[in-house]
Amino acid sequence: MKKVEAIIRPETFRALREMLEDVGINGLTVSEVAGCGQQKGQQGLFRGNTFEIKLLPKVKVEMVVEDEFVDEIIHIIQDTCSTNTVGDGKIFIYPVENAIRIRTGESGKKAIV
């Protein structure tokens, strides 16, 4: 099993969720986060004063899937969330040793479906 974690633009989340549902991925953890990278923030204007916004709003989408689905999910994220501009985000893949469903005690693949 693998954990796929994607940091994406908030405006691309709805389309990503729909595409993931279409291929049968329903178990997601979604968090509103803030961060910066090459995008380096942006300037804002408030009551005539200019200020720097260093951390931009992003969405973190996390899912644990069977190994054979990882490549397909990566392609879905890239195709759905890419605007071809700086700040589109990142995808991280982590190995998962085990997963346990608290309610039933099921573990492994049975716990993530």
Image (cartoon, rainbow, N blue to C red):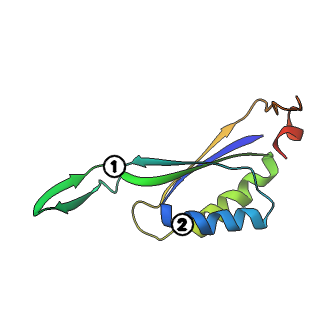
In the displayed structure, 58 sits above or below 108; it is: below
Coordinates of residue 4 in the picture (x, y in percent) = 66, 47
The amino acid sitting under disc 1 is Leu
Task: Compare residues 6 and 47 and report the one nearer the observer.
Answer: 47
Q: Which residue is mark 2?
A: 12
In the displayed structure, 62 sits above or below 88; it is: above
Q: Secondary structure at mark 2?
A: helix
> Of the numbered discs in the image, which one, if any, rests on residue 55?
1
**Mark 2 to mark 1: distance in Å?**
18 Å
Residue at image coords 17%, 55%: 51
Looking at the rendering, which quadrant does residue 3 occupy? top right
Residue at image coords 34%, 57%: 39
Residue at image coords 69%, 67%: 18
Direction from residue 107 to residue 51 in the image, left or right: left
Question: Nearer the N terminus, badge 2 or badge 1?
Answer: 2
The amino acid sitting under disc 2 is Thr
Direction from residue 94 to residue 13 in the image, left or right: left
Q: Quadrant of the N terminus?
A: top right
In the displayed structure, 18 sits above or below 99; it is: below
